[in-house]
Image (spheres, rainbow, N blue to C red):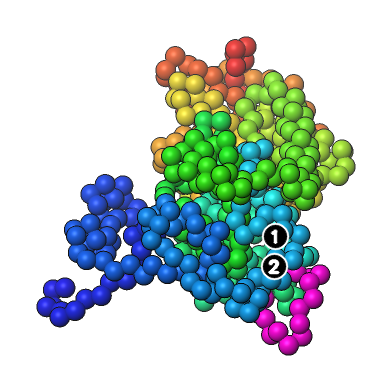
Amino acid sequence: MSFDLPLLVLLGDPQQLPSTVISRLAASKGYGRSLFERLYAGGVPVHMLDVQYRMHPDISSYPSATFYNMRLKDGPNVTGHASTLRPWATLLANTAMFQKLGPYAFIDVSEGGEWVPCGSTSFCNKMEAGCVKALVTSLYQGLAATSVPADAALPPLSVGVISPYNAQASLISSILGVPVSSRSSAAASSKCLTWGNSMSLQIGSVDGFQGREVDVLIFTAVRNNLVKDIGFVKNPNRQNVAITRGRHAVWVLGSKRTLEADEVWRPLITDANERGHLIQAREVELLKKSMDKVKEEEIAVANVQDAAKDAFSGTLWKVVFSQEWMGHVRKLSRKEDRAQVFASVRWLANGRRPPGYPKSTACNHASPEFRELIHVSNVIGHTLVWHIDVDRDPSACRQIIKLWALLPQSEVYTFVRRLEGGLRQYSSQHLERCKLVHCPGLGSSFTSTTPSSSRRGNSLQIGSSRAPVLPKLFPSGGSFIWWARDEAAAREGGAKPVLEHANPDE
């Protein structure tokens, strides 16, 4: 515009996602608005391309009414004879899942809940992920059973699974074995799984799918909580992008109870209900089976959690464990293995460490800044990944062992890198506190009744008395002494006397 252009044509859709602005201050000053939006808001004449040639009319109905003031019309290719103009439409309509859900559906998955994987701030939802797997599997089986004319030369039916949260996309990716797609369409095509000649599958985020389209779109909203907080899922532009990516079908998975509390999602759910597109997940037999399976897994994990709480009660250090760690322990088929894991953790939680600690348990895969915080121990042929934390309240100063995973050695590197992403959210002051052992005074002694250990590599082996004892932390009237680990004593296998009395209130 600074070059005295005789003509400037801008193409865009202000009802869809703008560019990402990281700075909240910049966003509050309007820097998130594009030039197109600024001119549009300033009254510059805008010509709207008001015919859409992508979506089935049942899909375009709500976006047209909500975002485009009913000005969006359906082209003849989506309202005409589908078998000639859009050949996959007829074949898709013959599948059992499409006959049950139709071209547009809001599927209420109010059971289960959201959670945050370790090393992440993103949310995922196992119940919705299980339903996604059931939908994709049913589609593939339905298409495989459909007789496609030999001379049809149809490309595979494209199926997209998207979510506002990267953690959910990664979870579904791990379940279905499909890499998460990137923003670029060229890169996305290389990360697309093709099943036979009938179906291709892409998984990604809502933002990454903007500007793309697929034959069938499955959207998983993820958020499901009692306080009905849905975070940035409430963004109307993100909702518009999510529900306008599909040609033949758009199926939205979400918790009606949580989403309808939001002013952006309430109209969508009301519209779906009024048009007969609101479906309870348990009314669909295949989804019901999937939800029951996830529920059984959650009960099994809950049993592990209860067992772990019993095993770690009364330990000197507080023990915190992630859902992923519980899931890994649950998969152990032998009770003896599970008991050995619990015994090893209890040994650590009672202040015991192998000789040479912390170097003997330091994770070599960790970045130098986290090498003294992230530790690994060999237990029953697996690698126990744990790290030391401390109560964020300085007056409490209680040290914590956090259990993150029980993995084969080959998976440790990737997991530790992900864990570091979570640790980087801590302040540098907090991380430095975690590296030190706190005690209210020196010159006293602590006698542990827990059996000590011998060292074999960095394995936890119960049976010897050559392991240093580290204390549990206790309040010390607002002032306490920082006691650094005596590495020389640790290398010699000696125990450092550090604490005499235990606080019965801890």
Assign a secondary structure to mark 2.
helix
- Kindly identify which residue carries mark 1: 98
Quadrant in which the C terminus appears:
top right
Asked whether 84 or 421 is in front, the reply is 84
* Residue 342: mark in rendering: none
Of all residues shown, which one is farthest toward the bottom?
151
As displayed, is residue 35 above or below residue 222?
A: below
Question: At which x and y percent is residue 105?
Answer: 61, 52
Query: Residue 52, image x and y in percent?
Result: 45, 69
Magenta residue span? 143-156
Q: Image quadrant of residue 181? A: bottom right
**Residue at horizontal 23%, vertical 57%?**
41
In the picture, measured across the screen, residue 430 lies left or right of residue 36, that is right
- Any magenta on residue 146? yes
> Is residue 445 shown left or right of residue 296?
left
Above or below residue 449? Residue 200 is: below
The percent position of residue 239, horizontal first and vertical second, equals 47, 52
**Residue type at tag 2:** Leu
Whether residues under marks 2 and 1 lie with C-beta atoms below 8 angstroms apart, the answer is yes
Query: Gap in Å between the C-alphas at discs 2 and 1?
Result: 7 Å
Residue 410, x across and y down, in percent = 70, 59
Q: Quadrant of residue 91?
A: bottom right
Q: Secondary structure at mark 1?
A: helix
Q: Nearer the viewer, residue 31 or 401?
A: 31
Please say whether residue 153 is one of the residues in the magenta stretch.
yes
User: Which residue is drawn at the image coordinates 69% and 85% (left, top)?
Assistant: 153
For the point 54% across and 74% down, the residue is 77
- Residue extending furthest toward the top: 504
Dominant secondary structure (helix, strand or loop) of the stretch shown in magenta = loop
Q: Mark 1 or mark 2, which is nearer the start of the sequence?
A: 2
Residue identified by numbered label 2? 92
The three-letter amino acid code for the residue at tag 1 is Phe
